[in-house]
Image (spheres, helix red, strand yellow):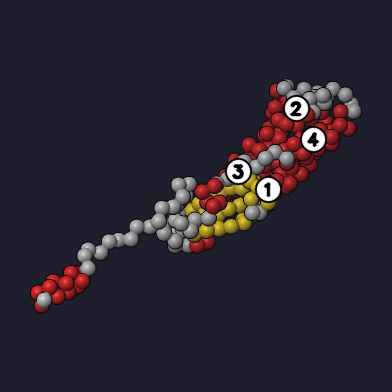
Amino acid sequence: LLVVMLCASLVIGCGGPKVKKIKEPVKSSSMTGNPDEPDWVSRGGGVFEGEYGKAIYAVGIARKNPSLNIMKTRCASRARDELSRILSIQVQNMTKDFSESAEDLYDPESQSAVEYFSSVSRQVTDNVIVGSEQVAMWKNNEDGSMFMLMKVPLNTVVETFKMEMKKALKRKEAAEALKFKTDDALKDLDKALDKTAETFTNKPAT
């Protein structure tokens, strides 16, 4: 009996080798592998019907740095760069929609129209970026990296597009370059712009 009790105490005392606890698997779409990662980090940029309303979103990333201010500055700069890229694509799509809805006003396939509207698109993108705002920020404690979410409300994009397009098309040189078919073509401009704005705004978020 003494021998049996001695053996039992040895087994309990050793307890076997310690096993390192494995973390629970994280969702496959995670960018960092950190289970605390917000959904917007892995979702990235685009047009979304998100927590902050329907808007164009972009994410900026900065690696660990001793200076918190430097990290924030880099995050904001990279988020704006991404926002500018997405905005440029969206504004080009709006310009195409406008050309289709306003084809009776001018020749949208002329080289002058393509060049002129490219200039207007850049102007719209530059103006909208100024009004972009930070809506969320997350620091990954595992590697010290920082993520920042920025947005521009979709309504801001639409209204800026309409404003800049009106200003551009009412210039004398634009009318000559785009060869408006009638002197009254500008009277139908608001209607064509409103149609484009409505179509773009009602498109499903992606």
For residue 121, say whether it is visible: no
Q: Which residue is mark 2?
A: 100
For residue 102, say whether it is visible: yes
In the picture provided, is 70 more to the left or to the right than 10? right
> Element at badge 3?
strand
Q: Decide: marks 1, 4 in contact (CB < 8 A)?
A: no
Residue 137 at x, y percent in the picture:
55, 58
Chain-order first, disc 4 or disc 2? 2
Quadrant containing the N terminus is: bottom left
Chain-order first, disc 3 or disc 1? 3
In the image, which disc is placed on residue 43? none
Chain-order first, disc 3 or disc 4? 3
Residue 55 sits above or below residue 171 on the image = below
> Element at badge 4?
helix
Chain-order first, disc 2 or disc 1? 1
Nearer to me, 36 or 174: 36
Instruction: Say what amino acid the circle numbered 3 marks.
Output: Gly
Instruction: Say what amino acid the circle numbered 1 marks.
Output: Lys
The CA span between labels 1 and 4 is 19 Å
Crowding around mark 2 (Cα neighbors within 10 Å: few <14, some 14 to 19, many 20+) is few
Q: Which residue is mark 4?
A: 195
Point 12% across, 73% down: residue: 4
Q: Which residue is mark 3?
A: 46
Instruction: Say what amino acid the circle numbered 4 marks.
Output: Lys
| Nearer to us: label 2 or label 1 | 1
The CA span between labels 2 and 1 is 25 Å
Residue 180 sits above or below residue 1 on the image = above
